[in-house]
Amino acid sequence: MGRNRSFDETQVLESAMHAFRRHGYAGISIKQLEEATGLSSGSLYNAYGDKEGLFRAAMAFYVEGCVAGRIEAHAGPVATLDDLEQLFLTLFREPMTDGNGCLVVNSTMEFGTQGSPAEEAMARSFDLVTAGIHGVLRREIEPERSAAEADKLLLLYHGILVFSRAGRFDEGFEDAVRSQFDILRQSRDRFRSRQQITQKEE
Amino acid sequence: MGRNRSFDETQVLESAMHAFRRHGYAGISIKQLEEATGLSSGSLYNAYGDKEGLFRAAMAFYVEGCVAGRIEAHAGPVATLDDLEQLFLTLFREPMTDGNGCLVVNSTMEFGTQGSPAEEAMARSFDLVTAGIHGVLRREIEPERSAAEADKLLLLYHGILVFSRAGRFDEGFEDAVRSQFDILRQSRDRFRSRQQITQKEE
DNA sequence: GCAATTTTAGAATGTGTATTTTAAAATGAG
DNA sequence: CTCATTTTAAAATACACATTCTAAAATTGC
């Protein structure tokens, strides 16, 4: 056994993640990644193999640390409509306000579908968000409308991430989100009272 | 005056635009652009100055030819909710189904806000779409809800472009769009009948 | 403390890149 | 036709890039 790593892996991955978020994969050089992480290229290559390896690690770090955590907290198995609304409202706060967007969505747009080094992380992230949103709506509103409303929210969510990256947050997007959730809460209340009536009849 | 260009400028810009759409700006090389356009680098540099110049030209070509035309047709000064719905439904058809997304949104995600060579084209395109959608809703539904509903549609629109690039169109997004426009049409009808009542009272 | 093994920093390497230069071919204007 | 000007293609250039190599420093297990 030789010596142990002297750098903080979490800190390096976090720096790399922010650098990729800002410049994209093709748009950043190893030299810039050295500056961002504070590591020399030798150490980076030793630890992650190559640029793609570092990118994959940064992606995984982002998905597990950032996406999975937020979904679990706001769209987990017992989450309510109000919790889900909070998920959407977090998109208007740090770190999304720095104009660098979401690493997963940025990378999706950079690579598209064909042979992307981000493929697994992308799929996992989309699946997490999709399952989270659909789960909450399936539990909360009437079943006939739940799928379409969930897809709407899914599109809304990713639309917000586009405008986050575009630096166009001046408009009333937060109001739009609240207004949509108000509508969903009305739908939920109608659904609940109808269920109560059905229950009484039995 | 020397000789005239022997290549079809429209065809070259269209090829370049599709190449940028597919690979991004940083992700494509001059050699690939030579292959895509059929021009030698000499001709490309003579005609467009440099890679960035060609990119700007391709962006302008896309915005004026693709975005502006679609907005005018489906969200112009006399467009209805049904027209606007058609705008959204075109996103599920050619050429958006090729998995290469929209050049403007792709470039937005690649460059973000800071000093992007796509800045003018981006701003123009976002403004066109924003103004088009807001215009239709201002005319069609009740004024108190119009802004929030327009922002919702704006986010929905760009969310669709994300999933278009992600190649994840298998889901019921088209239903989600139709369902949202059904709701807007109900809102419009309520608004209209309320206006009629007010008119009778006078 | 010794030896094996890993990390590390920096120099070295080769390839790919955008761009410029060159010279010949083409073509419009007079 | 002729001349000036432009396009064009291909070679030349210079630089940036990802990656590998080298040798020294560090650190663990025994």
Image (cartoon, coloured by chain):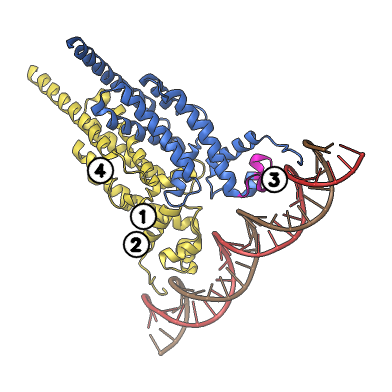
Chain colours: A blue, B yellow, C red, D brown
What residue sits 51% from the left and 31% below the top? A66
CB of mark 3 within 8 Å of CB of mark 2? no
Q: Where does the image place residue B15, in percent across and percent down from the top left?
A: 38, 61
Q: Which residue is drawn at 56% across and 39% down?
A: A17
Callout 1 and callout 2 share a chain? yes
Name the residue that disc number 4 marks.
Answer: B89
The alpha-carbon separation of the residues under discs 1 and 4 comes to: 22 Å
Name of the residue lying farthest toward the left: B200
**CA distance separating discs 4 and 3:** 50 Å
The first of marks 1 and 4 along the sequence is 1
- Residue A43: mark: 3
Q: How crowded is mark 4: few (under 14 residues within 10 Å), some or many (20 or more)?
A: some
Q: Magenta region, mostly helix, strand or loop?
A: helix
- First in residue order: circle 1 vs circle 2: 2
Which residue sits furthest top?
Answer: A200
Q: Which residue lies under the disc numbered 2?
A: B10
Discs 4 and 3 share one subunit: no
Q: Are the residues at dot 1 and dot 2 in contact (C-beta closer than 8 Å)?
A: yes
Alpha carbon of mark 4 to alpha carbon of mark 2: how far? 27 Å
The dot on residue B61 is 1
Task: Say which residue appears at 34% left-offset and 62% top-offset.
Answer: B10
Q: Position of residue A115 (x, y in %)?
A: 46, 52
Q: Check the residue under mark 3 and report the chain it is in.
A: A
Between tags 3 and 1, which lies in front? 3
Secondary structure, mark 3, is helix
| Of the pair A116 and B55, the residue shown nearer to us | A116
Specify whether A74 is left or right of A6.
left
Residue A111 seen in render? yes
What kind of element bears circle 1?
helix
Q: Which amino acid type is shown beneath numbered disc 3?
A: Ser
